[in-house]
Image: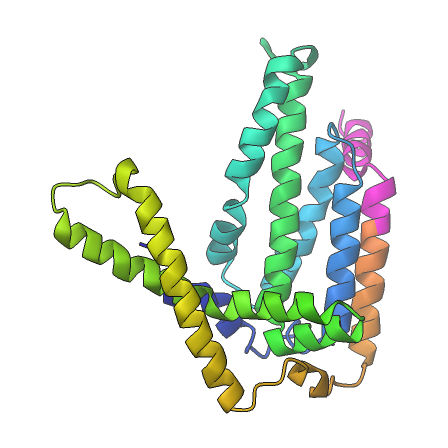
Amino acid sequence: MYQTEELYTLERLSAGNSVVHRLHPAVKIAAAVIFLISVVSFDRYALRPLLPFLFYPSVLIALGELPPALLFRRAALALPFCLFTGISNCVFERETAFHLGFLGVSFGFISLCTLLLRALLCASGVLILIATTPWPHLSAQFRGLHVSGVFMTVLEMAYRYIAVLLAEVRSMYTAYRLRSREAKGIAAAHAGSFVGSLFLRSADRAERIYAAMKCRGYDPEFSRTIKSPALKPADFLFAALVSLGCILFRFLDLPALLGLLVSRVLP
């Protein structure tokens, strides 16, 4: 079973003191949005032009002193869904785009690789934002941008207490295995009752947690009271570099230009 303490590894990383951690939260959110929009704006065959965008997560991981293996594992969780979505492209788009030696590469395979790379880049951009910005500051910035308070409250509760749900699943699964030692996993005949019991236990636990929070003075608008730091020259420099880099990577095919330059220089 998934260890609940692993869920908040990124939140613990957000307490760091690197160059990226010290940037203004609003600037990091804006940079992430610009990066995501630039990545998803390419068509489905634009595999080569997407490659320069790997600089964004690579540089921020280095400057933010983040563990690349952890971020890659988290980002890779989105790849299976994209793989199942894009695998049909290899079936229906069999026309050959180019050849690698004697091996022909189809347009469907290119679109599949583009989809996987795009998903990896987008997931990495979001994970880096979470790993370098404490959640209260993110929530305060989103509320300052007039994002729906109900949506933010639901998002905060889901983020904070999904570990409680996983703990309930682990407890019920342990009890099930103790009663059915020969079973390998949950039998299909018992899956419905298992999910129903999980829902009832989760609803009851949620009521008790919410009552405890209200007794301690819980305020959904608490994050609005968090004061953001003042903008510094480094924030404007970071925003400018990200914006210019995304514009450059979006409208110039740098790998093609680099290949052309190398072909002219080398004999």
Where residue 72 appears, as percent x and y from the top left, is: 51, 51
Q: Is residue 232 left or right of residue 5?
A: right
Along the viewing direction, whichever of 15 and 210 lies nearer the viewer: 210
Along the viewing direction, whichever of 84 and 231 lies nearer the viewer: 84
Q: Which residues are magenta?
A: 247-267
Residue 77 within the magenta-colored segment of the rendering: no
Where residue 124 appears, as percent x and y from the top left, is: 61, 53
Q: Is residue 213 left or right of residue 173?
A: right
Along the viewing direction, whichever of 112 and 250 lies nearer the viewer: 112
Residue at horizontal 65 percent and vertical 20 percent from the top? 108
Where residue 51 appears, as percent x and y from the top left, is: 69, 40
Residue at horizontal 63 percent and vertical 39 percent from the top? 117
Residue 59 image-quadrant placement? bottom right
Q: Is residue 30 above or below residue 137?
A: above
Residue 50 image-quadrant placement? top right
Is any atom of residue 64 visible in this view?
no
Task: Give the quarter of the figure containing the C terminus.
Answer: top right
Residue 120 image-quadrant placement? top right
Is any atom of residue 126 visible in this view?
yes
Residue 257 within the magenta-colored segment of the rendering: yes
Residue at horizontal 46 percent and vertical 67 percent from the top? 9
